[in-house]
Image (cartoon, rainbow, N blue to C red):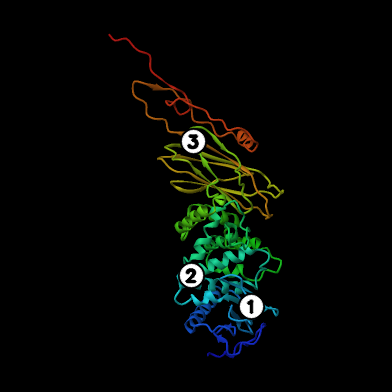
Amino acid sequence: MPQPVAARTDRDAFGDFTGRTRFTEHFAIKWGSEVTPDGDDLDTLARVLEEAWRENERLGLGQPLGTDVYYANFYLAGTGPETPTIGFVGGYATLDDDDVSYITMALEVVEGLTEGTPERSAHDWQSGVVHEVHHLFQMPALSYARDLWFWEAWANWFSNRLRPGNTDVLTFAGLPPLLPYAGVKTSTFNPSGAWGRHQYGIWVWPDLMVRAVGDELVSEIWSFHGVEAEPIEVLGDTLGASGTSLEASFADYAARRHVGDHEHGETILERAARWAQDNPTFDHRITGLIPVAPEPVTLRRPRQRPEAFASNFWRSEGLFGPGTLTVAFAGEREGTQGTPASFSVRVRTGEGWQALGLRAHQGSWTAELAEATKVDVVVATHPGVYLDDEVFGYALEVDYRPLAPAEPSERTCHTSGPAAPLSWVLLGLALVRRRRQWVDRPPAMGRAGSPCRAPAPHAVG
């Protein structure tokens, strides 16, 4: 059995594992007195642990706590009374009583690392080991208790980096599109329902951030920022120093997430559909449908108004034909707990996403549609303060003016001038409850609503 190298010291906070320890360069893999693990599985575990350690070092992260002197202990739970316990088939990373990092992993995970199991591939089982190693490197930087979502999202980002497209990252990433109005801090450990794994699915946002900024973003985020540091503030400062903004980054993530415009996006939306089938009461993938109507339509604040760092997704119920489309937005100035609001609004037609320029929480965007197209609108929130359960209200107004059809030569069509701009007074009133009015119009109408009339008959000589 390999012996420890001189650079580190073997120690233990739980008991004596003499003769039941496998050493790697950085880890001491330990098991109890009741089970002897398979040698091939131990070899694979050692390889995966060191691979993950080296990648964290390459990213510039500091050493896990205590490992400058000691090996990082890795315990195989369920192998004897000497080992820490675990109540699920997975793993966790934490500190012992002397504040030295260690990992506990269920034996079932290790038994699947080499050849896999009928339920999961070896690739999938290994992703869990990679995930936990990244947690070791996170611990010196930020308090785990302050923002669980931040820890789990970044650990799953790292898991996907080394084991791309593994089952866990794809499945859990289907939850944020299902519950878009839930803020990024939404997190529980209830594995029986959709809420229970929400924090693991946010990893797509870190992935987009790193792709936009570069690997150096990771070491900046996971440098020590103080035990009282708020991760969302650390993220904002780090992105700002890189030349982008927290608000723009989140708005980009929200828009891409809803339509799967990112790595594994199509597969993740398929997983979201599965979650919706199993949890229909949690299915809020589409906040509401935009009617395709030749008149201004007000879309009032939705039933599920977005929390902080959350979004709503509106989609047209059909295709808008050629014509002029204007989308206008008016947001409430404060959330339900008094926090100043901050919104981003993006519209997608056949030409990609376009951002509404907002001033004082109001703005509009107009486009000439050349052909029939679907329209998507994403409203994202990113206030300066995150309060649990606070939501932010707004109203949208969609004004569609179809292109007037060509008239037969024997008829004339009288129309007024161009459509007037949207009334911001009316849009502001949309934030107060009022009935939406539908106006029936004759089928043969000019652009501004003037009916086509047949010309007067003339004499034949």
| Residue 58 makes an appearance in the image | no
Q: Of helix, strand and loop, which one carries label 2?
A: helix
Q: Residue at x 61, y 73 (%)?
A: 86
User: Dot 2: few (<14), some (14–19), or many (≥20) neighbours within 10 Å?
Assistant: many
**Number of on-image labels:** 3
Q: Relative to residue 17, is residue 258 depicted above or below?
A: above
Q: Can you identify the residue that label 1 sits on?
A: 84
As drawn, the residue found furthest toward the left would be 461
Q: Relative to residue 432, is residue 171 depicted above or below?
A: below
Residue type beneath disc 2 = Asp
Residue 204 or 347: which is nearer the viewer? 204
Q: Is residue 348 left or right of residue 241?
A: left
Residue 99, how many percent across, how many down?
69, 78
Q: Is residue 220 left or right of residue 125?
A: right
Residue type beneath disc 3 = Tyr
Q: Can you identify the residue that label 2 sits on?
A: 124
The quarter in which the C terminus is drawn is top left
User: Dot 3: few (<14), some (14–19), or many (≥20) neighbours within 10 Å?
Assistant: many
Gap between marks 2 and 3, in whole Å? Answer: 48 Å
As drawn, the residue found furthest toward the front would be 34
Q: Earlier in the sequence, mark 1 or mark 2?
A: 1
Q: Of helix, strand and loop, which one carries label 3?
A: strand
Q: Residue at x 49, y 62 (%)?
A: 170
Q: Which mark is residue 400?
A: 3
User: Dot 1: few (<14), some (14–19), or many (≥20) neighbours within 10 Å?
Assistant: some
Residues at circles 1 and 2 in contact by the CB criterion of under 8 Å = no
